Amino acid sequence: MLGYMTRRVLIMVPTLFVISIISFAIIQLPPGDYLTTMVAEMEAQGNEIDEAQLDALRERYGLGESFFTQYYRWITNVVFHLDFGHSFDWNRPVSGLVGDRLALTVGLSIATILFIWIVAFPIGVYSAMRQHSVGDYAFTMVGFIGLAVPNFMIALVLMWIGLRYFGQSPGGIVSPEYADAAWNLGKVLDVLGHLWVPIVVWGTAGTAGLIRILRNNLLDELRKPYVVAARARGVPETRLTVKYPLRVALNPFFSTIGWILASLIGADAIVSRVLNLDTTGPLLLRALMAQDMYLAGSLILISAVLVVLGTLLSDLLLGWLDPRVRFRYGR
Amino acid sequence: MQPTHPYPAAPQTSVAAEPGPPAPGEPLLRIEDLRTHFFTDEGVVKAVDGMDLTVPSGKTVCVVGESGCGKSITARSILQLVDQPGRIVGGAVYWRSGTRPWTDLATLDATGEEIRQIRGDEIGMVFQEPMASLSPMYTVGAQLSETLRLHRGLNKAEAREKGIELLRRVGIPRPERRFDSYSFQLSGGMCQRVMIAIALSCDPALLIADEPTTALDVTTQARIIDLLKNLQEQNGMAMVFITHDLGVVAEIADEVTVMYLGTVAEHGTVDEIFGNPKHPYTRALLSSIPTMRGVRSGGSARQRLTAIRGMVPHPQNRPTGCPFHTRCELAIPGTCDTEAPPVARFDSAGHLAYCHLFTEPAERRELHTQATPSAPVSVIEPEVAVIEPDHEPEQHEPDHETHPRTPARSQGQPLLDVQDLTMHFPLRTGLSRRARTVVRAVDGVDLTIHPGETLGLVGESGCGKTTLGRCIARLLEPTSGHIYYRTDDGDQVDLTRLRRRELHAYRQQIRVIFQDPYSSLNPRMTLGQIIGEPLRVNRLARGSELEDRVADMLSRVGLRPEYIRRYPHAFSGGERQRINIARALVTNPRLVIADEAVSALDVSVRAQILNLLVDLQAELDLTYLFVSHDLSVVEHISDRVTVMYLGNVVESADTSDLYRQPHHPYTEALMSAVPLPDPGLRTARHRTQIPDDLPDPTNPPPGCPFHPRCPHVRPDRCRAEIPELRRTGDQRLAACHHSESLTLTGVS
């Protein structure tokens, strides 16, 4: 297990390195550099340009130097000082801009994965154990609807339901009346009341997919010789199902963490806009449209790192769960 | 066998058993008129339809028949282990053991507590695929303990102790360590031992073994069979042994039930079934297997096998009347195809067959007079060679074609001359995934094949025989060495030195027949496209000429030319193998490499294909390299045989010489492991036991690669010096230091 873990962790290093280079290359893509943009901006506004300040910035980012020197300065600042550079669109440090939003995004992602697991697990098991039953077909149909309907559409419908039947203010994560209030039970409940909408919206497609995967995997496993063999030595039916086929069929629960994280962090822009959520998605969209390259590059870097971390997490969980994974790489 | 350790007696729970355990020989299990049907979308499949079976206490009953005859379903029905959509729809499975009076297992709830108590406790079960029968998610020890804890109420530590004891008993070395291994860390043979340990953990009164050795190598098979026999002697348990291999039956059975299409064809003691078979199906089965009789009787002519025509019909298209009448040579029109056959009983109480031949009125039986129970069976149908040691094959000679063994090797130049061929596969392990070790699949092999001969290539799985075949066909790029091929004009070409483009010409002349008739044919192509492809890509023929040649080839391999537009899924395994052969032969090759070409086929179909290969060889002047793990098939078809072990040739000789007296201990071990379909030889044969695990091919042992398993190993050179392949007699080569001083036994 130790060898397997070491390998998984070590393999992250080159991956992250390549990701950071690509992110930085994206930052560097537009013609000119950060300073020329800033100078142009200030001149357009008729501001004085402080040469000393310019020199300090030039020094700070290593502008005019080779790509790799600039990259080196950028990445060391990122790694050692969490300084991702400056967003000229917002005229604020990137780290400050991203911090809150990232917390919300990661929090929502984790909540969504938990939601997917909690919903997909019993339904998947039920559908496999009662294959071709009415319930199986009903869940299959709901699942396909979840897969087929665009997320923003579901978001709109859920918001309408929230407003119409529960009297909730649409969008955001907190109602206006609590916006500036200190944290108390009412505010917590209000936040939870708002959060379920994005979680359900993001969760539908993943849940539907995972139900199908779990159902099919479990159906395959239920027919494996080792199930018959276990039955033949008198293992009671429920215990048999949980212990043998179900445990193998659980693999996708963990192996999907990586890609579910990726799809949530990257592709939530539209839903976040619809729901008026301050996640990283809309920020990235705006940064790209405004050619705010330090912000865009940083967001890409952070998202990619999170995906890599998610993959690592799922690999480690798989290794813990499945001895075949553990031993095949453990040698 | 490992030395067996005294086995602690199971706690005797039956203190005051009223009926008492059945005495040895008393029936323990009685299956009566069992019907297990599968309710599929296409209709009802009557997999088992009126099966009877009685298992006496302490005896072994073999159930034998071809695939699709319902053997496994019968075995699974006993414990109600039939998967959906299968269901027991009729009949009874009476069981008694210990305190239990006769219980009909078929009426119990399949998921209920009662049958669960019997499974694994009173009746143990072993399956065909040992690897897949163990869950990879838990250690083998955990799965072994599970049974003990369920049925014996042991705690974890006790179960571990008992489990290790059981593993030792089934001959697993270092059981303390193996207990914590996972199934994928063990070999197939080891996994099967674990399965046997699980099945035996609660001292069952009956063990059901469903093709337990089919997936194993012949050496491993011999050890598992011996193990089962020994365990049975110690425990006094009864066994139901399902197999399609008549050799295994002769080795282990007390009684035999021959099954055909879900019902009994014949039942008798093992001596009755082999010595005096009554049912035409039993006789046909016995005569369709190569028996190595050519060697044992000193015959030098290759006999044709008697194939059963056609194949086992799908149970959905079950014929009316006698299920076998569609393939039976002796079917009586008007009777066999309309009426279900009555039971005919013979001399001894137990011997019976379901066949009209024995109850037909005398006048209608005229034609079949010889078929009366007392008459010798061999006369009933000249082709039916009966397995009786005193029969000489010459008796049948006028009735079938014989092919004299070609003495081709002595004259002229070899067609193929392989010199020092190696094929190494790098094995990527460790943190860096760099290739640190190599598997020496083929490690310096010399081989010659002469025009017109059939060279058999045998060895256990993992010995490199398939890799060697693929190297010769240049499907693999050998690491080093030479493959000299003599062209039509007499030039010698080294195939290893040729580039892809230059190889084209030789790809038409050297062709391969693959093992798996199912996966080796592209399901999206018609027969015309599959068989015509080699002609098209090599630009040998186009358009109507191509079609003509494909159609001609189809009829040569015994398929109708009209099939040219059909897809492979419409064909059975045997027919697919004919398609495979047609594809190999359509380019008019000179050398054909048959890689386990008949291994996946049932015995009756295998006989058809072997006959076809022999016919085509004579017709088309072919040279065969016949790669197989099956020594009896190789004996039947080959002129010369080469034996491989761990990537090396260890022995090479003319077939009859080799089988009469091998010069290498490995060959002897292989031969003694082959179960011969003759129960009379069971006790007479001296068994050479070798450990059943091949050494790690990445780290072959020093000295002679066979020395860790060799029963004749001597302390002097075997462990230090690698033996050269050297001449040990007329036309004989062997790689053993002590060939001359050893007197090894072949198939005697």
Image (cartoon, coloured by chain):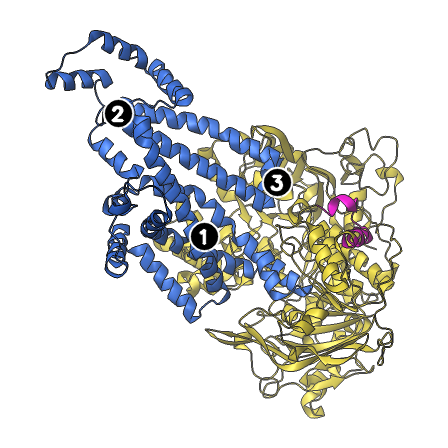
Chain colours: A blue, B yellow
- Of B648 and B405, which appears nearest the observer? B648
Q: Is residue B212 above or below residue B701?
A: below
First along the sequence among labels 2 and 1: 2
Nearer-the-camera pick, B566 or A128: A128
Q: Nearer the viewer, residue A172 or A313?
A: A172
Count of labels shown? Answer: 3
Is the C-beta separation of discs 2 and 1 under 8 Å? Answer: no
For marks 3 and 1, the one nearer the N-term is 1
Q: Which residue bears the numbered disc 3?
A: A327
Task: Give the amino acid at mark 3.
Answer: Phe
State which chain disc 2 sits on: A
Q: CA distance from mark 2 to mark 3?
A: 49 Å
Residue B178: percent from the left, percent from the top?
74, 46
Have a look at marks 3 and 1 and say if they share a chain.
Answer: yes
Residue in the foreground of this view, choosing between B134 and A105: A105
Residue B668 at x, y percent in the picture: 80, 47
Q: Determine the image quadrant of residue A234.
A: bottom right
Task: Identify residue for label 2.
Answer: A92
Magenta residues, start to end: B158-180
Is residue A136 shown left or right of residue B193? left
> Which residue is identified by label 1?
A117
Residue B418 % position (x, y): 63, 35
Is residue A33 at least partly visible in the picture? no
Which SS class for mark 3?
helix
Q: Chain of mark 1?
A: A
